[in-house]
Amino acid sequence: MCLALPVKVVEVGSGPDEDWAIVDLGGVRKEISLALLEDVKVGDYVILHVGFALSKLDPEEAEKTLALFAEMAAAES
């Protein structure tokens, strides 16, 4: 099973080719590749899979999805 997650872009232009970004998911920050997308800006939400941003995501939909993940995590506790 593969899982793609919505993440928020907090920095753009890192990495040797400047096509990398730093994203945040619940306080965890990770450097990811933007090689498959154009025009990604700080504050955008993207779908992350295996270190690559696959597509941009509507912020409202991203926040709903992240809220559902948070509910599931709270239910497991």
Image (cartoon, grey):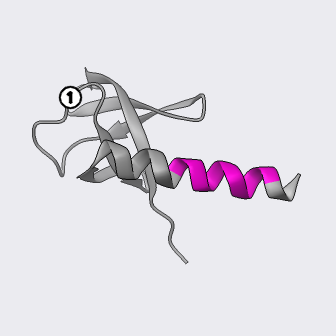
Magenta segment range?
66-74
Asked if residue 3 is positioned above or below residue 8 in the image, the reply reads: below
Neighbor class of circle 1 (other Cα within 10 Å; few <14, some 14-19, many 20+) is: some
Residue 27, position as x, y percentages in the image: 60, 28
Q: Nearer the viewer, residue 31 or 44?
A: 44
SS for callout 1: loop
Residue 43, position as x, y percentages in the image: 30, 27
- Please say whether residue 43 is one of the residues in the magenta stretch: no
Q: Nearer the viewer, residue 9 or 2?
A: 9
> What is the total number of numbered labels drawn onto the structure image?
1
Magenta span: chief secondary structure: helix
Q: Residue furthest right?
A: 77
Which residue lies at the image location 50% right of the left edge and 72% below the top edge? 2
Q: Nearer the viewer, residue 50 or 65?
A: 65
Residue 45, position as x, y percentages in the image: 33, 41
Q: For mark 1, what is the residue?
A: 41
Q: Amino acid at mark 1?
A: Lys
Which residue lies at the image location 37% right of the left edge and 52% below the top edge? 61
Q: Residue furthest bottom?
A: 1
Which residue lies at the image location 26% right of the left edge and 24% below the top edge? 12
Q: Residue furthest left?
A: 38
Tell me which corner region of the image, top left, top right, bottom left or bottom right, holds residue 20. Answer: top left
| In this picture, residue 56 sits left or right of residue 25 | left
Quarter of the N terminus within the rendering: bottom right
Asked if residue 5 is positioned above or below residue 33 in the image, the reply reads: below
Asked if residue 27 is positioned above or below residue 52 in the image, the reply reads: above
- Please say whether residue 73 is one of the residues in the magenta stretch: yes
Q: Nearer the viewer, residue 39 or 13?
A: 39
